Amino acid sequence: MFDAIKSMPAKVCLGLSFLVGILYSINFIFFSSCSVINGDADCFSLIPNGATIENETYGRGAGTLYVAGALMFGVSSGTLLILNEGARGKWTIMLPTIAGFTCLAMVLAPPFQGDYETANNNPLYATIAALGLYIAAYVMLKEEGVDDGLAFNMGIKLNNEAKYAVMLSSVIGTLYTINHLFFADGYAGAGGSTLLSGFEEGSYWTDPIAATPLSIRVLATFFVTYVSMGLILLTNGAKGNWPVAHVLLFGITFFSLSIIVGNFATIEQVIPGDDNSPYTPDDSTDLTNSIVVGIVLLLNIFAYYKMREEGVEEGMTFGGENFENSDDFFYKMYPAVTAGFVVLLLIANFVTQPISI
């Protein structure tokens, strides 16, 4: 299995890194409402957050972590693609992933948490472990051509309408990255300035289940990965760059659908011992977020469609074997995987996330 990677140590490092990512992804997508209360309502969570009622993070931000899980699922799909298809030329996936997880480690580090500390440092330790394994794999895969074609260009190499879609998507992603990294307090309603309209100022202090600024910064670190992938396509061109194009397309799809489907489901947050529980999440940003991610999703689908004209699927493989018909990915595999993920989101929102009281 995964014979495309020849180095066993590199394969083990990638596999362990994937395992860490997918476990957190599953936990957040399906069980975040239980995780944020440390499983105290006799509910199930793969990875409880370790918080107690005295911690500020207790009961907060289940919806934000759910979205983070979808973003992480897309990143993990990139690792799975490398294991399945080999390392040659996959710097387009690995370097953005390293950048994103480096930012995540910094955001989770106590000196950068500000006034919103996590209940424990387990997420930081898991991030450092996954990042270390991933970097080790990257170094070992240099012998297998992971850096083939590595280039940092300044000019735009996409030639048709795809460049406008990627540019606009990248601008939107960059704005949200900057806002969520540096103006998370204001966006979360905890006070302070914000570039983009978020929750009502002061609402954080009156809403016991509001997302912490720290969890909003976590979202931004995943945006770093996807924006970087978009810029790589923009400056290196589409031809033969199907691996990063696929990860970007799936990642944005998972992210967008998690928000759109999640906004249709109102999941009340249970806080054990609180007489006012359960609490209904603040939906004041739902419409704006749904519109923005819907636009970004359509931009990325259109961009991929137009990049096919520029040879993005040249050399495309599945399990190391060439696609007999390149149309199969865009018209069969992508819709099928998307439909499957929608089913998982429906299960999460209507079955596993709600906590019975």
Image: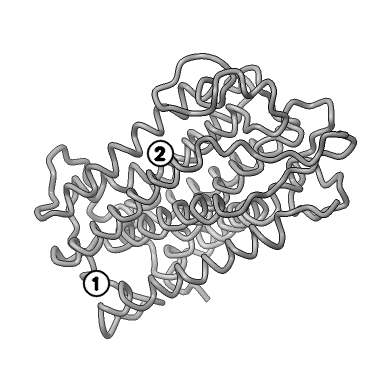
Q: Quarter of the image holding residue 224?
A: top left
Q: Residue at x 52, y 62 (%)?
A: 11
Q: Is residue 71 left or right of residue 282?
A: left
**Residue 340 circle label:** none
Callout 2 amino acid: Val
Q: Residue at x 82, y 34 (%)?
A: 276
Q: Is residue 277 left or right of residue 193?
A: right
Secondary element under disc 1, as helix, strand or loop, is loop
**Residue 315 circle label:** 1
Q: Is residue 200 left or right of residue 123?
A: left
Residue that lies at the very extreme toward the top in this rendered image: 192
Q: Which residue is drawn at 84% across and 32% down?
A: 52
Residue that lies at the very extreme toward the bottom in this rendered image: 324
> What is the distance, in whole Å, between disc 1 and disc 2 at their CAs?
27 Å
What residue does disc 2 label?
224
> Residue 75: x percent and y percent?
47, 53
**Residue 114 vs residue 151, the one in the foreground:** 114
Given this view, does label 1 or label 2 mark the residue nearer the observer? Answer: 2
> Residue 322: x percent and y percent?
30, 80
Q: Quarter of the image holding residue 9?
A: bottom right
Colouring of the image: one colour
Secondary element under disc 2, as helix, strand or loop, is helix
Callout 1 amino acid: Gly
Q: Is residue 1 above or below residue 357?
A: below
Q: Is residue 16 above or below residue 313?
A: above
> Residue 258: x percent and y percent?
52, 54
Crowd band around label 1 with a 10 angstrom C-alpha radius: few (<14), some (14–19), many (20+):
some
**Residue 54 vs residue 107, the one in the foreground:** 54
